[in-house]
Amino acid sequence: MTQSNNNFATGFLLGSICGGIVGGILGTTLISRRSEIADSEESLNGMAPNRALKNMSVDLRTDEQIEAARRRLEAKIAQLNETIDDVRDQLGSMNSAPSESESSS
């Protein structure tokens, strides 16, 4: 019993250390890649002289995109609700109509 507890504790400790190392390396790599991508995008966009103005225009563009996506989503939801109502009506009429076996008996 003591041997299995010792093996579990050793395995848990070793897994935690290895997981921490792998997570640290992965996080560092992803952060450095993210900053490289951001730097390359800024160089491609020509770096606006007024960074606050540039960020504001990005925010406005993002707000407009969010609003457009919201409108499209509302239209799709309305279309889906209409389809659900149609199917519900069809199923209701099928359940209320007598079947052939009931009418012939």
Image (cartoon, grey):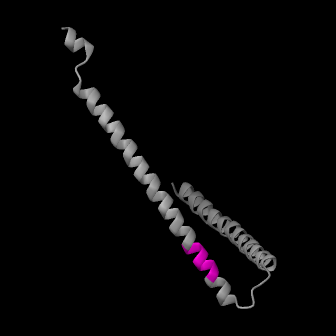
Q: Is residue 90 left or right of residue 56?
A: left
In this rendering, the count of numbered labels is: 0
- Rendered position, 1 above or below 96: below
Q: Residue 36's x, y, as percent?
A: 78, 75
| Outermost residue to the top | 105
Q: Residue 69's x, y, as percent?
A: 53, 63
Q: Within the image, what quadrant is residue 31 found in?
A: bottom right
Q: Residue 71's x, y, as percent?
A: 48, 62
- Rendered position, 101 above or below 24: above
Residue in the foreground of this view, choosing between 21 and 31? 31
Q: Within the image, what quadrant is residue 39 found in?
A: bottom right
Q: Is residue 53 left or right of residue 42?
A: left
- Rendered position, 55 above or below 6: below
Find the magenta span and give its range. 57-63
Residue in the foreground of this view, choosing between 68 and 32? 68
Q: Residue 103's x, y, as percent?
A: 20, 13
The C terminus lies in quadrant: top left
Q: Residue sitting at 72 percent across and 70 percent down? A: 30
Q: Magenta stretch: dominant SS?
A: helix
Q: Residue sitting at 57 percent across and 58 percent down? A: 8
| Outermost residue to the bottom | 50
As for residue 9 lying within the magenta part, the answer is no
Q: Residue sitting at 63 percent across and 78 percent down? A: 58
Q: Residue sitting at 57 percent across and 56 percent down? A: 3
- Rendered position, 105 above or below 65: above
As for residue 59 lying within the magenta part, the answer is yes
